[in-house]
Image (tube, rainbow, N blue to C red):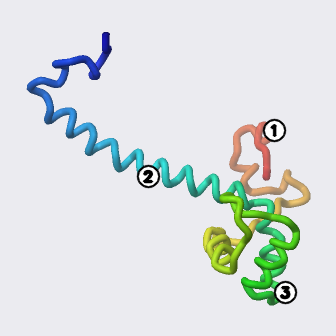
Amino acid sequence: MKLGSAREGHWEGREDRRRAGISKGQPKAAKAAAEARRKKARDAYSGLMPGIMAMRKEGLTMAEIAEKINAEGHLTRAGKPFSASMIVRLLQRQPTAPAIEPAADLSDSPLLRLCPDPAGVAVT
């Protein structure tokens, strides 16, 4: 016995509603899936990014960076060695704004002055 909208005859005369629901939900689902993939990629390589950024500031080429990372034994999420184009993609995923270091004395932080309960705020 099937339940809900899977049961036989449930959509008779109302197929337009089913199609409208599908067309409305698919773009949202695709957007959510794409964001989930981007988040997994950012998280997977977050440990490598400080080293990659440092090597880039030293003036190493993308191929040299990939070679060093491979020599350290790192692999892509697919289990393959890094390539220069993979390094380019990793750098393109990085936010353009530099990371802001928290103030040493957090009581002077303007964000905490705006917060009603500074004790409950974690600064990362």
Q: Secondary structure at mark 2?
A: helix
Q: Which amino acid type is shown beneath numbered disc 2?
A: Lys
Instruction: Quote the CA–CA distance across marks 2 and 3.
Output: 37 Å
Find residue 119 and name its label. Answer: 1
Q: Which mark is residue 58?
A: 3
CA neighbours of label 2 inside 10 A, class few (<14), some (14 to 19), many (20+):
few
Residue at the extreme left of the image, as rendered? 13
On the image, numbered disc 2 is attached to which residue?
31
- What residue sits 69% from the left and 76% below the top? 83
Secondary structure under the numbered disc 1 in the rendered image = helix
Q: Residues within 10 Å of mark 1 (few under 14, many from 20)?
A: few
Residue lying at 76% horizontally and 42% vertically, measured from the top left: 121
Please indicate whether residue 97 sits to the left or right of residue 67 in the image. left
Instruction: Tell me where residue 105 appears, x and y as whole percent.
Output: 90, 56
Nearest the eye: 107 or 14? 14
First in sequence, mark 2 or 1: give its number: 2
Residue lying furthest right = 104
